[in-house]
Amino acid sequence: MLTVIGEALIDEVVRPGQAALPHVGGSPLNVAVGLARLGHPVQFLGRFGRDAYGDMVAGHLRENDVLVPVAPDAHPTSVARAVLDDAGAASYEFSLTWELPAVAPGPGGAPNFMLTATTLLHTGSIATMLAPGAEQVFAAVVAAHPSATISYDPNCRPSIITNVDYARAQAEKFVRLSDVVKASDEDLAWLYPGVDPLESARTWLALAGEEGPAVVVVTQGGGGPWAVCAAGEAQCAVPATTVVDTVGAGDSFMAALLAALVERELDGAQRRPALCAISCEQLEEVLRYAARAAAITVSRAGANPPTHAELLEG
């Protein structure tokens, strides 16, 4: 079982000259759906309300075979308003509630019962930055770390978390406990202004010595992803495609990146040595797979990650 912890949102997408259309979203939720579509059993631990938008979230997760063990609560479902420009790029406005006591560890810091069977736990984005839920998520990561691979995507939202010093400290706290980290070049430029992204990635790779991440991946939009690991560096080109919009592209990339590592049997804490020993050639293969997933997603409207069959066709 794979686990994703994080926010569920309704994206109200506004295209030039058109009325807003609601779609289920949220970066971690999109990753969970992406993993499920790639054929992996996955559960999503997040929150949404007992309202019409919450019903949309629950229905979307069910339709994509994502397990949802956490019940809806009394707060309104969170909303992100995505305003697209003529090139399809999105800017966001948010109305958020983020608190998730259901993921808190049990007595003595033992993993919550929902995490005991997981071999990989992914989190990131708003869920790891916005109080009070961010500390609940971190406690869950600490409890799961002895048994599960931890993956993290900061997916920074400067319009929500405006204090860059706080955001940097939060990101580094999660990076230290992560095995796989993915960030965009824009994330790194905001967290570390004036620093070369490669230097930032290498710094993250070495944050906690042997206990730090095994792989740090950086995406660059149309520039193609690259990664650093103990063996060196890997990169690949972005497949040619027609861009409809970029909504959910990074999340599709993240899901396929994790799926590729799981399919290579590199998930689970007992496999950390093998993950740390990943070769540059293996990492390049993983990047190509993830880049294909992102290319398919940007070729169609909204956060609509590909299935395993679609990736095989590519």
Image (tube, rainbow, N blue to C red):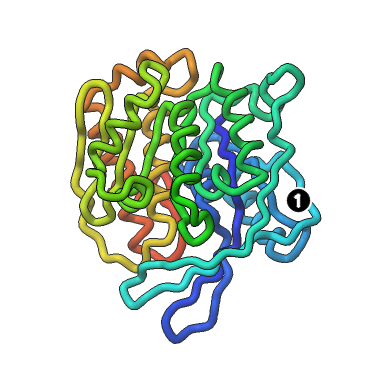
Percent from the top left, x then y, of residue 231? 22, 21
Asked if residue 310 can be seen in this view, the reply is: no
Looking at the image, which is closer to me, 263 or 190? 190
Q: Work out which residue is located at the far right of the displayed protein and give it.
A: 74
**Residue 128 quadrant:** top right
Amino acid carrying label 1: it is Pro
Percent from the top left, x then y, of residue 106? 74, 24
Q: How many numbered marks are there?
A: 1
The residue at 50%/71% (across/down) is: 13
**Mark 1 secondary-structure assignment:** loop
Q: Work out which residue is located at the far bottom of the displayed protein and give it.
A: 17
The local crowd at label 1, few if under 14, some if 14 to 19, many if 20 or more residues have their Cα within 10 Å, is some
Looking at the image, which is closer to me, 227 or 295? 227
Residue, disc 1: 72
Image quarter (top left, top right, bottom left or bottom right) of the N terminus: top right
Asked if residue 61 can be seen in this view, the reply is: yes
Percent from the top left, x then y, of residue 247? 42, 61
